[in-house]
Amino acid sequence: MFQKLIATQNNVTGLLLRLPLGTVMLYHGLQKAAGIFGGYGFTGTMQFFTDTIHIPWIIGFLTIVIETIGAVGLLVGFLGRVSALGTFAVMLGAMLTVHLPYGFSMNWFGNQQGEGIEMDLLIFGMSLALLIVGSGRYSVDRLLIRPTHKTIETREPVMA
């Protein structure tokens, strides 16, 4: 079961998906967890989750964990499918609880009260693609894959 979960090919597709996704999610996770990059930190974020948008504390806590530890998992390619699924779930929750009322577009020009679902859709696509292809090249998952068969070296026939 674990081998199927981490199975991935040695191609760049997973790498090219997980690096930008992990970077964006870690940025937002560090805002929530540590209060850097203009964030509210753990306590402020938890208060926002529970008091303002009225989600259970465990969902708020898991959101912070997924956006920080899960994002690091994406960056290094460790349990990439699990992190991608968590990221998809977090962004689905953000879309339904916060972003949907503001329409499609992000707040590029500061003329709306919040962010629309534009970024959520991009993250959905990247997450779903990672669920399919896995972490790819230069990933911890790739290092953990147990060989299923020995490779046979073939030689060209020698013509005399």
Image (tube, rainbow, N blue to C red):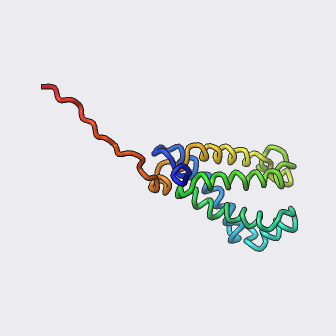
Q: Is residue 124 left or right of residue 97?
A: left
User: How many marks do you count on the picture?
Assistant: 0
Q: Position of residue 146 (x, y in %)?
A: 43, 53
**Residue 58 left/right relative to 37:** right
Q: Residue at x 84, y 45 (%)?
A: 103
Residue extending furthest toward the left: 160
Which is nearer the eye, 114 or 158? 158
Q: Up-down: is 75 above or below 156?
A: below
What residue do we see at 61% from left, 57% from top? 23
Q: Is residue 11 left or right of residue 33?
A: left
- 72 displayed left or right of 60: left
The C terminus appears in which quarter of the rendering? Answer: top left
Q: Position of residue 58 (x, y in %)?
A: 77, 66
- For image coordinates 70% across by 51% down, the residue present is 88
Note whether 54 is above or below 138 in the view shown. Answer: below
Residue that sits furthest to the front in the current view: 1
- Residue 97 placed where, x, y %? 83, 55
Residue at 77 percent of width and 74 percent of height: 43
For this orientation, the residue located farthest to the top is: 160
